[in-house]
Image: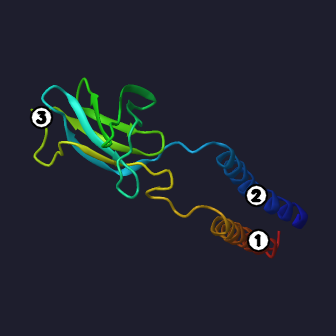
Amino acid sequence: MKILRRTMLWLAVFGLIVPHVGQVSAADHTPAAPTPQAQLVDIALTSNNVLQGQLVDRQGAPKAGAKVQLSSGTEVLAEGISDPEGAFRIPVERGGVYTLSDGEASAMVRVWTQEAAPPSAQPAVLMISDPELTRGALGRGGMDTVIGWAAIIGVTAAVIWAIADRGSSSPN
């Protein structure tokens, strides 16, 4: 009975470890998609339903010639090319929540027609294009992740071991 309990304990620990190893290796081999910024920005369209914006790099320099796409989910609805000052204009059929992306970075925007826009809506969006900029991330992996998983696995094993030992001391 004691051998069966210990075998089940180690199978449980192994089951906790294996799914996470697969997730980590899949993330290592899949190219990262642009991550939307955490904040939703309200933008008012122009009178002829055009979304205006400017694309800059981390230092604030305009990013010319970049394709900026407006999408909803996985469907690209419209796109524009940034001019030498980084300005872009994208025609939008109707208001809604969309993702703006230049391939390196993206932003979530809530687009309003001029008539429906709240007073807080901005006339244009400022996008910072930087593949290194990630908002809301909890570290970059590496040793911090390894130590964290080792701690979780160790605590889980200790709890399961304690439960198994407590059960084996009862007269059954």
Mark 3: which amino acid? Ala
Q: Which residue occupies 71% across, 66% down?
A: 153
The tag earlier along the polypeptide, 1 or 3, is 3
Secondary structure state at the residue bearing disc 2:
helix
Depth order, front residue of 107/155: 107
Quadrant for residue 159, please give it.
bottom right
Residue 21 vs residue 97, the one in the foreground: 97
In the image, residue 55 sits, relative to residue 171, either above or below, namely above
Q: Are marks 3 and 2 in contact (CB under 8 Å)?
A: no
Q: Nearer the viewer, residue 103 or 33?
A: 103
Mark 1 or mark 3, which is nearer to you?
3
Residue 12's tag is 2
Q: Are marks 1 and 3 in contact (CB under 8 Å)?
A: no
Task: Tell me, for residue 116, which label it has, or none.
Answer: 3
Question: For the residues carrying marks 3 and 2, which lies nearer the camera in this image?
Answer: 3
* Residue at screen point 37% across, 38% down: 99
CA separation, marks 1 and 3? 61 Å
- From the image, tell me which residue sits under label 1: 161
